[in-house]
């Protein structure tokens, strides 16, 4: 192997001079125009932009109600509160998720209970059923990387009926058996963070067919008040507060941006699917790489493309792979460390062995760049860098040790 074939982390020339992010938002002139028109309308919060965005979102999700809120985290908090979760209650969820999922249960006063994942990287229905106790109040299924969790199978496996929240922060546009995300669970939470396929900068929503749950979320986003500022006019200025809430309102111009972005949801998902298919073809024979699962009857939104690295076959541990890709100008990352092994959750009883499949996967996952604006040439750089790193590592046993290993991720077993 020539010096030119060395990976950058071993002294070679980086694959890219300009870093490639793992995800990136896309804005066009229609987005800018929508925001400017909203700003000029005179309504910075509330008003018709919010109502229009909610109507469009409910239509995309095949649901009766969509309630726009300030973030995906707020959506989780409000969904948990709408189900009445409180002290002494348990909520079963996945350890392979962003920490906000479990934090919403803790903030409600309840206790998150972590069940293991299945081959689809989402909650395993049998593992969920095994964790149900008399204190179990609900289940939060997580649509990992944009793959809808099999909510139907989870419901069938439960020993007694329980409400199911779908954390769909990454899965808007995905489908299960032809049904869109947002129509599968009792209530679905969405995120419109900057790197999501549909963005409003920050923002989120709760989507449901249940009118009572939707009303609870509406009041919860507005301090628990019985009326909004728009509804209080002329002689109708009084209101009551019937429950504890906070300010989780989305601004009008965020809603205008979200509505403009929704019009491109399907074309964006199609491009990400093309890139995911292309990754599969280009990486399918690379030693030590396991591709993302593709369960039948499910369509991912392809928010993330996360491969599994086998250290024995690839030639070096996962952490070294991420470090080596970043040295190449490829901003690979991890989604996610196992939540129950993060320091806060260890202090609440989390320990290794509670969810062995999730723990093993969390030590091997690498998120590769994937976003609708990514070019084939960008993707070729990612693939070339991975091939170069694998070839170098596999031909030099002990190379990763010689170059030193980074410390374990916070909360991961050492």
Image: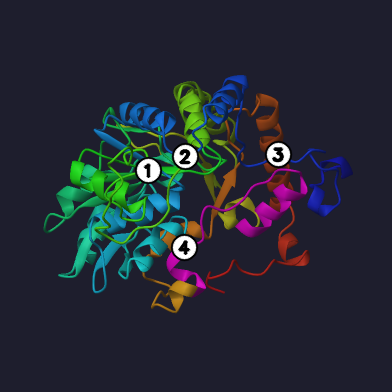
Q: Position of residue 105 (x, y in %)?
A: 34, 64
Q: Nearer the viewer, mark 4 or mark 2?
A: 2
Magenta extent = 317-343
Q: Which residue is mark 3?
A: 20
As drawn, the label of residue 338 is: 4
**Measured Cα–Cα span from mark 4 to mark 2:** 37 Å
Q: Earlier in the sequence, mark 1 or mark 2?
A: 2
**Measured Cα–Cα span from mark 3 to mark 4:** 26 Å
Mark 1 falls on what kind of element?
Answer: loop
Q: Residue at x 11, y 58 (%)?
A: 160
Badge 3 vs badge 4, beta-carbon distance below 8 Å: no
Q: Position of residue 132 (x, y in %)?
A: 20, 65
**Measured Cα–Cα span from mark 3 to mark 2:** 35 Å
Disc 1 residue crowd, few under 14, some 14–19, many 20+, Cα 10 Å: few
| Residue 150 visible, this orientation | yes
Q: Earlier in the sequence, mark 4 or mark 2?
A: 2
Q: Nearer the viewer, mark 4 or mark 1?
A: 1
Q: Earlier in the sequence, mark 3 or mark 1?
A: 3
Mark 2 falls on what kind of element?
Answer: loop
Q: Which residue is mark 1?
A: 229
Q: Earlier in the sequence, mark 3 or mark 4?
A: 3
Q: Earlier in the sequence, mark 3 or mark 2?
A: 3
Q: Which residue is mark 2?
A: 45
As drawn, the label of residue 57 is: none
Disc 3 residue crowd, few under 14, some 14–19, many 20+, Cα 10 Å: many
Q: Is residue 314 above or below residue 93?
A: above
Q: Position of residue 360 (x, y in %)?
A: 46, 61
Badge 4 vs badge 2, beta-carbon distance below 8 Å: no
């Amino acid at each position: 192997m020539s010096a030119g074939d060395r990976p950058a982390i071993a002294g070679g020339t980086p694959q890219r001079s300009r870093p490639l992010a793992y995800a990136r938002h896309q804005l066009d002139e229609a987005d800018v125009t929508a925001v400017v028109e909203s700003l000029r309308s005179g309504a910075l919060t509330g008003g018709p932009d919010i109502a229009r965005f909610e109507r469009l979102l409910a239509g995309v999700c095949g649901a009766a109600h969509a309630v726009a809120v300030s973030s995906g985290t707020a959506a989780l908090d409000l969904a948990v509160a709408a189900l009445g979760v409180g002290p002494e209650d348990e909520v079963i969820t996945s350890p392979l998720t962003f920490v906000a999922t479990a934090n919403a249960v803790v903030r409600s006063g309840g206790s998150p209970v972590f069940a293991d994942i299945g081959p689809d990287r989402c909650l395993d229905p049998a593992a969920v059923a095994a964790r149900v106790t008399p204190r179990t109040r609900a289940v939060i299924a997580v649509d990992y990387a944009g793959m809808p969790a099999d909510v139907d199978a989870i419901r069938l496996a439960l020993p007694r009926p329980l409400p199911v929240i779908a954390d769909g922060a990454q899965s808007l546009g995905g489908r299960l058996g032809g049904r869109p995300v947002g129509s599968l669970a009792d209530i679905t939470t969405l995120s419109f963070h900057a790197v999501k396929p549909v963005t409003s900068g920050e923002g989120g929503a709760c989507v449901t067919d249940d009118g009572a749950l939707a009303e609870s979320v509406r009041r919860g986003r507005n301090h628990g008040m019985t009326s909004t500022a728009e509804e209080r006019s002329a002689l109708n200025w009084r209101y009551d507060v019937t429950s504890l809430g906070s300010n989780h309102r989305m601004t009008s111009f965020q809603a205008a941006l979200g509505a403009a972005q929704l019009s491109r949801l399907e074309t964006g998902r199609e491009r990400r699917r093309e890139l995911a298919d292309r990754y599969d073809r280009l990486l399918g024979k690379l030693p030590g790489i396991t591709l993302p699962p593709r369960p039948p009857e499910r369509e991912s939104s392809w928010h993330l493309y996360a491969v599994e690295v086998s250290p024995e076959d690839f030639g070096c541990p996962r952490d070294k792979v991420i470090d080596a890709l970043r040295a190449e100008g490829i901003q690979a990352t991890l989604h996610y460390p196992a939540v129950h092994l993060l320091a806060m959750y260890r202090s609440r009883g989390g320990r290794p062995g509670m969810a062995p499949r999730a723990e093993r996967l969390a030590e091997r996952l690498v998120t590769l760049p994937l976003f609708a604006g990514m070019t084939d040439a960008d993707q070729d750089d990612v693939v070339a860098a991975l091939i170069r790193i694998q070839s170098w590592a596999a031909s030099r046993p002990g190379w990763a040790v010689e170059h030193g290993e980074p410390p374990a991720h916070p909360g991961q077993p050492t």
